[in-house]
Amino acid sequence: MSIDFAAVDFETANVLRGSPCAIGLVIVNDGKVVNAYSRLMRPPGADGPEDFDAFNIGLHGIDWELVKDEPEFLEVWRTLESDIAGLPLIAHNAAFDIGVLRDALDLSAADWPTLDYSCTLVASRRILNLPSYSLPFVAAELNVDMGQHHDAKSDALAAAEIMLQLCSRSSKNSIDELLTSINVRWGRISEGNWHGSTVRPSSSRRELPEPRTDASSDHFLYGKHVVLTGALPSGVVRSKAQDRVAYFGGIPQENVTKETSLLVVGDLDPHRLAPGASMSSKMKKAFKLQLDGQKIEVMSGMDFLPLLE
């Protein structure tokens, strides 16, 4: 069984995804677990017990006293990158764990890595027939030892063994073969961009429109790379707004990248731009790029709609 990957599990200090306090990492080489460990860490910016929610502590038993003398997230992550290098990541509910990674890197003012990843929860839904696809249910179905649930190392080990068992049960010799057989794509994260490990879209999925070649270069949107996020005012459908952007010579994008010149936040509340206010990951990315010298504007939906007339 030629299967190589790194399984990961994050535990968080509070309801915010960007608050990792522990990570479990398992390295699988040629279908065998060759290394497994966990690390405690201080969440980005955490400086006291108030950064830990009682609910989260009740799940994993990690509080401020346990991590206050540990390195902060970014320092720990940097020490793990050499073990992960070149390997795809596997997680159970990868949307959560990759979300933790993205948000924690954003809060640490660090670039996202380039990684492929897949989700054992998504794969299990395509292969197994269970009342629930949470980690304990899937592990029980596949006779995988759960260890201590919500211990980062135990959960990462369980995810690793689940992926190996899914490949074995499906008679597949690689994760690529498994995902292809169940019509699931690899997820991918790279600087400023990501997409999830999900069921492949049908061929009828809408493609982003191309900019009109004969559009007037005098229009504000001409030549701009435009990202839309949030609900637009007046019930304007995002796809129609993207069509209008292309009509005026703009280039619609799904995610903020180093090419983006305009981020439109449809439901932008001016208070969300105040110091210390919470922001979406796309807004955080846009402001980080601004600080790095990129010319990118953040605009509300109310200011954007008149540009489409």
Image: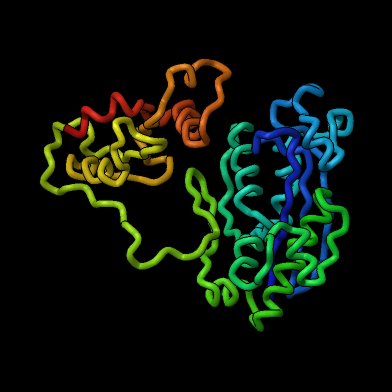
Q: Is residue 119 above or below residue 22?
A: below
Q: Front-most of 109 and 53?
A: 53
Q: Determine whether, in the image, residue 39 is placed left or right of residue 178.
A: right
Quadrant position of the C terminus in the picture: top left
Q: Quadrant of residue 224?
A: top left
Residue at 15%, 36% in the rendered image: 217
Residue 86 appears in the rendering: no
Farthest front residue in view:
131
Q: Position of residue 176 (x, y in %)?
A: 57, 73
Q: How many marks?
A: 0
Q: Is residue 172 above or below residue 66?
A: below
The answer to whether residue 145 is visible is: yes
135 or 83, nearer to the observer: 135
Location of residue 277 in the rendering, given as x and y in whole percent from the top left corner = 55, 20
Residue in view at x 25 percent, y 44 percent: 240
Residue 103 falls left or right of residue 308: right
Q: Nearer the viewer, residue 46 or 109?
A: 46
- Residue 10 appears at what percent x and percent y? 73, 46
Left/right placement of residue 207 relative to residue 48 reads: left
- In the rendered image, which quarter is residue 117 located in? bottom right
